[in-house]
Image (tube, helix red, strand yellow):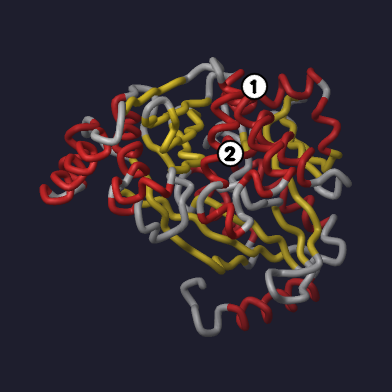
Amino acid sequence: MPAARIQAVSWQAFEAPESRLAWDALAQCAAEPNPFHESWYLLPALRALDPAGEVRVLRFEAGGELAGLLPVRHEKRYYRWPIRQLCTWIHGNCFLGAPLVARGLEREFWRAMLDWADRNAGGGLFLHLAQVPLEGPLHAALQAVLAEQGRLAALVHREERAMLASDLSAEAYFEASLSGKKRKELRRQFARLSEQGELTFERSTDDDRLARWIEDFLALEHSGWKGSQGSALASHQATTRLFKEALFGAASQGKLERLTLSLDGEPIAMLANFLTPPGAFSYKTAFDERFARFSPGVLVQRENLALLDRSEIAWCDSCAAADHPMIDHIWRERRAVGRISVAIGGKLRRALFARVVRAELGRNPAGI
């Protein structure tokens, strides 16, 4: 087994070209894909949202090569409670907290990370891992390491979100997912929408006219309820910058797919996927609410089922909230993700953590 070590470094250190090359190589051999922790997404997020450099990146090396990576920080609050913790860094546009870890080194990564957390707990009472996939090699390795160390941990939140994973063709899946009545209604809506003007659909996997597409998406999303509530990407300079840099970065690595439904040349529904074989992630979607009665968002999702016909893509994570009113009725599979709190440090710290866990899970022993 190659010698392994882990250290926390400034994220700015990864701006160097050679560091990014090693990072990109790691993403290609990762045990599980996570676009939100790849260089083309995480670096723009850190530049936009952590200009002071409070976030550190855990750099895991094996045999002198980069073999794992995860952003972390010390937090003064644990959601609404004033409890300090060491946690993975998650922001509002990061939909998975899985570390990038070289395939086959999952247990070595978790051992090294937990050892590092023990020695660098600071004022943190425990380690908090957010948006963790609850199935797959990373979760299995974490559970194995926790068991071998006899280390207390608790699943404090669990949810299931829509996922697309089937051996069916796109057409067969569509027929199996929706009732005949619903399919008939969608055909009627498509026909009525076509009467409003020339309806066209475009799918792109390159960067042709990407700058224009980004501006159109930002404007479309901001024109609806997200803009009214101040949660649209264009509502804040930082998220606008993140979106632009991330999409150009994804396109430069051949990992971006864009879908556009247009009426008379004007986009009325748009969707961006991140392609990270063997999986994909449905990152962002927006539609023109003036045409809501025609369900343009559902119509573009109908086209998105073409992911099933891609031989290199086995599944797609919706990145949607649990019980999403639209995508849950189209994508039938579910992906479980959760938040896991882990004991770190010495005996006293771990004893205090055990009390916190009991209090937190007192009414919800299976996880909040």
Q: Secondary structure at mark 2?
A: helix
- In the rendered structure, which amino acid carries the disc numbered 1? Ala
Q: Residue at x 85, y 49 (%)?
A: 54
Question: What amino acid is labelled 2 in the image?
Answer: Leu
Image spot of residue 340 (x, y percent): 59, 61
Compared across the picture, whether 259 is left or right of 28 comes to left
What is the number of the mark on residue 123?
Answer: none
Distance from Cα at disc 2 to Cα at disc 1:
31 Å
Asked whether residue 121 appears in the rendered view, the answer is yes
Q: Which residue is mark 2?
A: 218
- Measured as percent of width and height from the top left, residue 108 is found at 65, 41
In the image, 13: left or right of 130? right
Q: Is residue 298 above or below residue 244?
A: below
Dot 2, crowdedness within 10 Å: few (<14), some or many (≥20)?
some
Q: Earlier in the sequence, mark 2 or mark 1?
A: 1
Numbered disc in front, either 2 or 1: 2
State the image quarter where residue 1 is shown. Answer: top right
Residue 259 vertical position relative to residue 99 in the rendered view, above or below = above
Nearer to the camera, 91 or 303: 303
Residue position for label 1: 25
Residue drawn at x 45%, y 35% as measured from the top left: 270
Is residue 1 visible in the rendered image? The answer is: no
Image quadrant in which you'd find residue 359: bottom right
Q: Which residue: 57% across, 61% down? A: 339
* Quarter where residue 117 is shown: bottom right
Q: Nearer the viewer, residue 34 or 323?
A: 323
Residue 263: x and y in percent read 37, 31
- Camera-side residue: 181 or 197? 197
